[in-house]
Image (cartoon, rainbow, N blue to C red):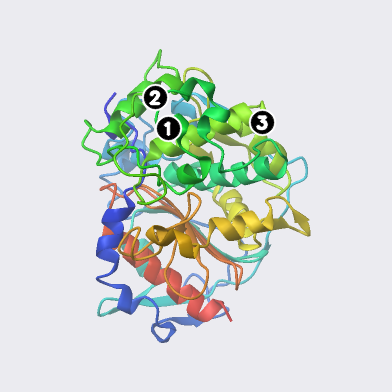
Amino acid sequence: MALTALDLGFRGAAVGLALNLVIAGLTSSAHAQVMPGAANDGAAAAGPVFSDTGPDAASYGAAAGFPVGTRTTSSQLENLVGSYSHFGEIFSSRQVRRATTPWLFKRAAEPAISYKFGSEQRSIADYLGHNPTTGLLIAKDDTILYEHYQYARTDRDRFLSQSMAKTITSMLIGIAVSEGKIKSIDDPVSTYVPGLAEAEYGKTSIRDLLHMSSGVAFSEIYDGQDDIARLARDLFIEPGKNPVTSVAQFNTRATPPGTKWHYASVETEILGLVLRSATGQPVADYLHDRVWDAIGAEADAAWAVDSTGQEIAFCCFNATLRDYARLGRLLAHDGAWEGRQLIPRQWVLDATTVRPADGHLAPGTATSYFGYGYQVWLLPGEQRRFALLGIRGQIILVDPTTKLVMVHTAVRNQPSEPRAYAETLALWFAVLGQLGR
C-alpha cells in the first residue's frame, strides 16, 4: 500500500512557511465582526446544521453517495469524504467506549462571524462555501455556538483525526507519569521498551520524543518513498511487522538530542509503545479509563491498530465532532473537568509552553510560524494558545484564557495547503477577537 492511501502525519514546517505571508491580517480583532443572535442568515439555531453538499462535491463523490473506498483507494479524491468518516471501519481498530453518563453541552444562538483574509472580508458561510470542511464546531466553555456539517456528514460520524492523535498520546503520557507508571520523562525509552535497548531511539529520552527533538534521522516528505511510507507499510499492510522492529530500523543519529526540532511521526509511535508497556493495557483502553468516560463522551470512538493490536499512536483516532470539542474543553481547562483534574495541570502547562532552555521549540524557530510543545503545536504571541493539527485540515484550536475551542475536520485535496491553514487561523483569530470577551 502506498502512503497516499493513508495520508499520515502533518508537515508543519511547510505550513509555517506560508502562514507568515498572511499573519499580519490574522491578529487584528478589528477585522472580525460578530453579531450575536444571528444564525443561518437570520434564523436562530437550536442544534447542529447539516448540508448534503459542499465545495466541489461532485469531485468528492457526491453522485455515488460519497463512497468509502478500500484500504488501497481510501485517499482517492472521490473517496476522501467517506474514508475520513469511516476510517475506523476500513482499518482494524480498537473501540473506545462512550461514557456511562454522557456530559451534554449547552447551546446558544449562532453568531454571524466574519473575518478578513487578504484584502477580502468574508463570512463564515463564505469559509464553508469554498473550503472542503466536513465539520466545524465552535464552543465557549460548556456552550456550543456553532456546529455545521457538509457533504452529508452528521453529528454521528466519527471523523479521522490524523496527527491530532499525537496530542492525545502525549496527554496520556502525562497521566502515566502522575500515576508513577512512568517514573520520569527523562528516562530513556529502553527503560520501558527493552527491545529498543541497542537502537538510537532506545537511548533517547521520553522528553526528547515528546518534543520531536530526538536527533534521529527520519524523513517525512510524503513522496511514497520516505521513512513515513516505510513505517506505514510496516504497520498497516497485513500481515505487518512488529512495531518495535519497525521503529528500530530508523537508527542514525543526525544531531544531538534535545537541540533541534524535526517532525517525525515515528517518535509518537514509540511513545505509544512506552505507554503500552508502562501501563500494562492498550492505549485506547487507558484513554477510555482516564479521560473518555470522565469527560462524558457521547459516542464510541475508535483507534486504528497494527497487526499486533498496538494502537498506531501517531495518527488514526476517530471520534465525533462534539467529542473532539469535549477533549478541547478539557485542554482549555488545563486538564480539569468539572472540578476533577484528569490530566495534571502542570503537565498541560509544560506541554503547551516553551521553556527558556528549549529555544529550538519556540514559535518562529521550530517552524517559521508554530512552536512545538509535548506533541502539540504552539501559536505565537503573548497569550498561551495551542493547536492539535492533522493532515488535510484536521484541527482543534484552544484558547485557555477564554475557554474558546474550535474543531475543524476537512478533506483537503492537497495534504498540506499552507494558505488554507492560514485562512482557518484567520477565522480563529476573528472568533477570539469578538467571542473571547
Q: Give the percent coordinates (x, y) of residue 335.
A: 66, 56
| Tags 1 and 2 touching, CB below 8 Å | yes
Rendering coords of residue 400 (x, y %): 59, 67
Circle 2 residues within 10 Å: few <14, some 14–19, many ≥20 = some
* Residue at the limit of the structure toward the front, as seen here: 256
For image coordinates 27% across by 46% down, the residue present is 58
Disc assigned to residue 201: 1
Q: Which of 117 and 68 lies nearest the eye of the viewer?
A: 117
Q: Is residue 327 left or right of residue 422?
A: right
Looking at the image, residue 1 sits to the left or right of residue 143; the answer is left
Q: CA distance from mark 2 to mark 3?
A: 22 Å
Earlier along the polypeptide chain: callout 2 or callout 3?
2
Q: Earlier in the sequence, mark 1 or mark 3?
A: 1
Q: Position of residue 366 (x, y in %)?
A: 35, 58
Q: Nearer the viewer, residue 139 or 289?
A: 289
Disc 1 residue type?
Tyr
Q: Nearer the viewer, residue 119 or 51?
A: 119
> Residue 145: percent from the left, percent from the top?
58, 68
- Report the amino acid beneath label 3: Thr
Q: Residues within 10 Å of mark 1 (few under 14, many from 20)?
A: many
- Residue type indicated by callout 2: Ala
Q: Which residue is mark 3?
A: 279
Q: Is residue 146 visible?
A: no
Residue 329 appears left or right of 33: right
Residue 378 shows up from this direction: yes
Q: Quadrant of the C terminus?
A: bottom right
The numbered mark at residue 64 is none
Mark toward the viewer: 2 or 3: 2
Q: Secondary structure at mark 3?
A: helix
Label 2: state its secondary structure. helix
Q: Which mark is residue 248?
A: 2
